[in-house]
Amino acid sequence: MTWYLRSVAATYPNLTALYSIGTSVQGRELWVLVLSSSPYRPIVGQPNVKYVGNMHGNEAVGREMLLHLIQHLVTQYQHDTYVRWLLDNTRIHIMPSLNPDGFSVAKEGTCQGGQGRYNSQGFDLNRNFPDYFKSSNKNSQAETEAVKLWIARIQFVISANLHGGALVASYPFDNSPNTRPGTEDCHRKPLCGVFQQFYSSPSLTPDDDVFRHLASTYSFNHATMHLGLPCKPGASAFPNGTTNGAQWYPLTGGMQDYHYVWHGCMDITLEISCCKYPRETKLRDFWRDNKKALVRYLGEVHRGVRGFVMDPQGNPIEDAALKITGRDVGFTSTKYGEYWRVLLPGSYKIEAYAEGFLPRQDEFYVEESNPTLLNITLFPDHRNESPSPPSSSGGRPAGGLMSAASSDVVAHQEIRRRPVNFVGGPNTLQGSAPQREGALGGIANLLGSVSSRVSNFFSSLG
């Protein structure tokens, strides 16, 4: 794989740039290939997207599909108008293998089993990240730390990580406040997994509509995923080939929840093969099934709202806290003041806050055809006191909204507070999610406790 990536980078220097985010426990490079029409010089305002494969070392199809995708993008840039548009307007980061140590001991032709799943120290990397719902004291691994630093440096807008063992697009949350010990990974034990289908419940994000859309985009562009067929008798079936992660099975320390809560990145999990490590002769069929979906998913970053957060002189404001009103998981601006948020068509309000500036709220409309450009101007708070709650500036700030499709300007109003219920960011504490309250929460806890005991029994059998 290293030879191939270096070869592509050398052959297509105008479209690719190869870099490493660190090394595995055993010292293997964690390679990432950037694909863009400006690979060495990021274009301000251009969104970053990423794919991560082979997080579980024995799930090899994702690794191979990402290598196929790289080849497709670089060879079709001159011939395919959609591929050209994608690379001209998007900065694509592809990591074929997050767990090269596990892959090195996995066995080709092994469809089930765990050999190679974990890293070289025996840790499941998709249970090794900070968790919003439960505190985890697992030792953070070298691969995990590398990813955490990577996504702290680059603001990714959407992402997907590729797995194997099922055929479904799974979206956050992967965990919930009512997860009980003994229920995690129950799906991997046949009898336990069958029982779990009847009592697990979804754990929905404030952006559930967007996550459903992203998962469906992949599923319906895949050759068969949208049919929702189980991989084997007794396995889970998925309507439309999508599922909420926690409804399928809960897990603590997953990467997609971490990306979303800590860094505002909309990340989903793609299970793209019933067999985890099939024979090489099957790769042509897997590429045929996944090719369109892999390409089209990347294009979904170009919907919603985007723009710049600036001061009145046009200087960028870094680390401004932003959220869509009614959607409490927030996001931040980059050092250039850039921000992006994927949204479906409709009317929204965005709230913006930065230290030393008066907060602000703007209304905008998202259309299907093009992203909405909304530049936000924040005015300094000259009162030399805490900006929460600041007084109204008494006038209409200069920042406006332009629709990329219609240039309609809509009303805005100022807000006198920091965005309320702002969730997320690098300083989020593990286990800080609010617990369910009231009668329904009590019933859920009771059922969770009972189901946990029953699932433990089935787990011992399975």
Image: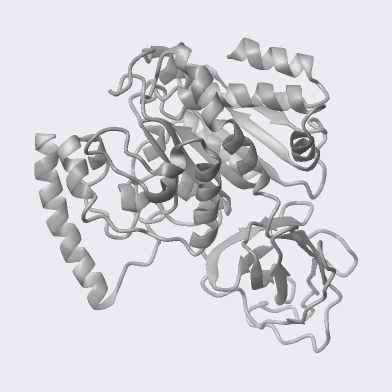
Does 396 sit left or right of 83 as displayed? right
**Between 260 and 229, the one nearer to me in the picture:** 229
**Between 343 and 33, the one nearer to me in the picture:** 343
What is the residue that sits farthest to the right in this orientation? 313
Which residue shows up at 53% across the image and 67% down it? 328
**Between 297 and 233, the one nearer to me in the picture:** 233
From what the image shows, is residue 34 above or below residue 159? above
Where the N terminus falls, by quadrant?
A: top right
From what the image shows, is residue 15 above or below residue 243? above
Q: Is residue 387 visible?
A: yes
- Residue 117 x, y percent position in the rendering: 36, 25
Which residue shows up at 39% across the image and 24% down it? 119
- Residue 116 x, y percent position in the rendering: 36, 20
Q: In terms of image quadrants, where is residue 345?
A: bottom right
Which residue shows up at 71% across the image and 57% down it? 339
**Between 335 and 77, the one nearer to me in the picture:** 77
- Residue 238 x, y percent position in the rendering: 36, 47
Where the C terminus falls, by quadrant?
A: top left
